[in-house]
Amino acid sequence: MEKCIKSNKHLEEYLDYLKYQKNYSSYTVDNYQRDILEFLEYLQREGLNYKSVVYSDLRFFLMYLKQDKNDKNSSIDRKLSSLRGFYQYLANEGVVKNNVFTLLSGPKKEKKLPRYFEYNELEDLFLACDLSTALGQRDRLILEMLYATGVRVGELVSIKVSDINFSSRHVLILGKGNKERIVPYGDYCEEILKLYLKKGYLELNKENSPYLFLNNRGGKLTERGVRYLLEQIIEKTSIQKHISPHMIRHSFATHLLNQGCDLTTVQKLLGHESIKATQIYTHVTTDRLKSVYEHSFPRAKIDSSDK
């Protein structure tokens, strides 16, 4: 796989474009790389050149993903999206005549509502961190900051201490496309932030790093590192759910809407360009309202004893 990367300068250039011009996170760039390499390796096995593929070649690739690999629709759709972006780049650079992937429609994605934690589950996660240690203080702050601000994991690990306004209690976030936004944080996050900066951060910051979240060697914590430590934290609880930074982001948005926050404000806090991306959370809260209604309203259901 490494050999394939070195022999394809256009892929190398595209990945650099995503990282340095589009400001995509390393995690996202890695996913693009895997998806595109899978296609290039498929073409190599089939004796095809990536510069001259036609629509029928793509149809056979789609059949390969569905029938041979048994990929889920959501996985296939993501791969086609990665390849559509790559070929648009190749078309813009004059490497290919046109973006052949614009002709190919992916399978319909299964609509899935965002999964989130209930507030009591988040409390269990918070309490699983040992505040007597530097790493425990850091881990607790990661949880508090993710939940208090709703930031993406790539945005979280990029926070510098200088990005925090302690008097007004907000953080300057550099989001997708180098767009900045201001997100506030509350009392609980502030309490742990002060503890961490006073103790744990000083212990971890062996290299005089400007970043807020550091690993045990004093370097900047990575997105993968955050995912790993969240998995370690949830194992200390009785919660039987998968955990990810994005799931805490979902919890942030869902809990705000459940408490009556308007959709536009949630959109701005999350850094969504379009409100359509935020509207998926209204389905979650609608289901929540229905559940509360059925359990609380006296005439929501007919009591069997009344029949």
Image (tube, grey):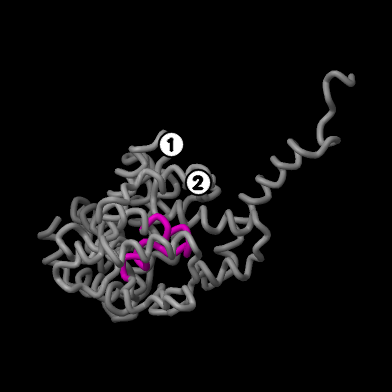
Q: Residue at x 42, y 76 (%)?
A: 166
Near-viewer residue (177 or 260) = 260
The stretch drawn in magenta includes residue 118:
no
Identify residue type, mark 2.
Answer: Phe
Q: Which residues are magenta?
A: 142-158
Find residue 37 and report its horizontal and vertical position in percent: 23, 58
Disc 2 + disc 1, Cβ < 8 Å: yes
- Residue 88 drawn at (x, y percent): 36, 73
**Amino acid type of the residue that numbered disc 1 sits on in the rendered structure:** Ile
Instruction: Reply above or below: 59 against 266.
Output: above
Where, quadrant-wise, is the N terminus in this rendering?
bottom left
7 up-or-down from 230: above or below: below
Task: Give residue 192's quadrant in the image.
Answer: bottom left
7 relative to 22 in the view: left or right: left
Q: Secondary structure at mark 1?
A: loop
User: Looking at this view, is 279 or 57 the one in front?
Assistant: 279
Q: Which residue is mark 2?
A: 117
Residue 303 as seen in the image, left or right of residue 167: right
* 16 or 141: nearer the viewer: 141
Q: Main secondary structure of the magenta part?
A: helix
Q: CA distance from mark 2 to mark 1?
A: 10 Å
Nearest to N terminus: mark 2 or mark 1:
2
Write down the quadrant of residue 100 in the picture. Answer: bottom left
On residue 239, the disc is 1
Q: Is residue 149 magenta?
A: yes
